[in-house]
């Protein structure tokens, strides 16, 4: 399959996951493709790559699909900075790359949506973003913990989030306000 | 396509997105299927359904794929309670359903992984979880805001996350520690 065809198939996958096509998704798609190329790696099956995203806009869905960094795998770290900045790191090589989009794409552009999407996808990388290879401390891998039933509601709670009330294990919602005010 | 074939194709989609198959993914898959059935709706193209997930484990990736509630669309709300509890609401009908998994599936079971996945997917809903129709206040839809270049680093920041320093617009990392200590 040619690179163009692969790109197209991958874009379709991102659109299917996100539910629709938009300039924000195109931004995250392009960022992810640049990151994988810069890190000389491919989409991981587990947590081999981590992404630190500084926004929670549409582009993050493309990061999940294309770079394989997702909330459920624990290798997508969200920082609420409202910035179109994405840092990717590869656990094996220890290499990391920080990608800052030069001018975020949005629906508030004068262009039509389709025109804007095509423009983003076609932009040369150097016009689209600033790429810097950086050093970062890699976060630990996601862990699995045992669960316990909450003594109040009976629902199961993962041990590190369990609380204690009257000597019994409870969940956070059942522990709410316990020990705060009278 | 028969229901069994659809189920199988959807499961394959979830596995492809997550990067691998595991009991946690099967849990989120089953939860999402039950939710869509209970709400009598289908996977949305935008934010028509919202999900409130009380964990960030593997199952959340299935919620993103199957129920179409994702971090990038703004219709996935994460509460860090460590509970296998998922609430889904439909904006159009106003209906909401809360699904609490009875005993979370995990890698720490004595069964083999494949056996555990099959068991979860085959369990009758009533043995797998508790389903309650509930009333919830729906969060606002995601909004798009203008961005400004940060006066210090030059990177763009979304207006609601912008800070002010020396009368100029800056981003959160550049504003860090400004006004805290001397």
Image (tube, coloured by chain):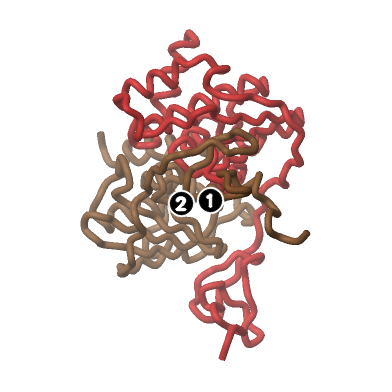
Chain colours: A brown, B red
Identify the element where label 2 is drawn: helix
Locate residue A179, reporting x and y percent: 68, 58
Residue name at image x 54 percent, y 40 percent? B83
Quadrant housing the C terminus of chain A: bottom right
Please state if A7 lies on the left or on the right of B135 as rendered: left
- Numbered label attached to residue A24: 1
Q: How many marks?
A: 2
Q: Are marks 1 and 2 in contact (CB under 8 Å)?
A: yes
Q: Are marks 1 and 2 on the same chain?
A: yes
Identify the element where label 1 is drawn: helix
Residue name at image x 37 percent, y 44 percent? A68
Instruction: Looking at this view, name the residue that lies furthest to the left.
Output: A93
- On the question of residue A21 being in view, the answer is no
Give the image quarter of residue B135. top right
Give the image quarter of residue B14. top left
Instruction: Looking at this view, name the residue that lies furthest to the bottom.
Output: B182
Of residues B36 and A23, the one nearer the viewer is B36
- Numbered label attached to residue A28: 2
């Amino acid at each position: 399959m040619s690179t163009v065809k692969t790109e197209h198939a991958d874009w379709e996958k991102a659109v299917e996951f996100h539910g629709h096509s938009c300039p924000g998704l195109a931004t995250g798609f392009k960022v992810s493709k640049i990151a994988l190329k810069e890190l000389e790696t491919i989409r991981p099956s587990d947590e081999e790559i981590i992404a630190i995203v500084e926004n929670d806009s549409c582009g993050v869905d493309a990061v999940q699909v294309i770079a394989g960094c997702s909330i459920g795998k624990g290798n997508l770290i969200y920082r609420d900075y409202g910035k179109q900045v994405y840092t990717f790191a590869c656990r094996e090589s220890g290499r990391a790359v920080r990608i800052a989009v030069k001018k975020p794409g949005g629906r508030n552009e004068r262009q039509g949506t389709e025109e804007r999407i095509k423009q983003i996808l076609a932009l040369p990388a150097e016009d689209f973003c600033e790429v810097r290879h950086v050093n970062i401390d890699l976060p630990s891998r996601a862990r699995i913990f045992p669960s316990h039933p909450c003594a109040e509601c009976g629902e199961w709670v993962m041990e590190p989030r369990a609380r204690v009330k009257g000597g019994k294990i409870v969940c956070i919602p059942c522990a709410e306000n316990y020990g705060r005010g009278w």
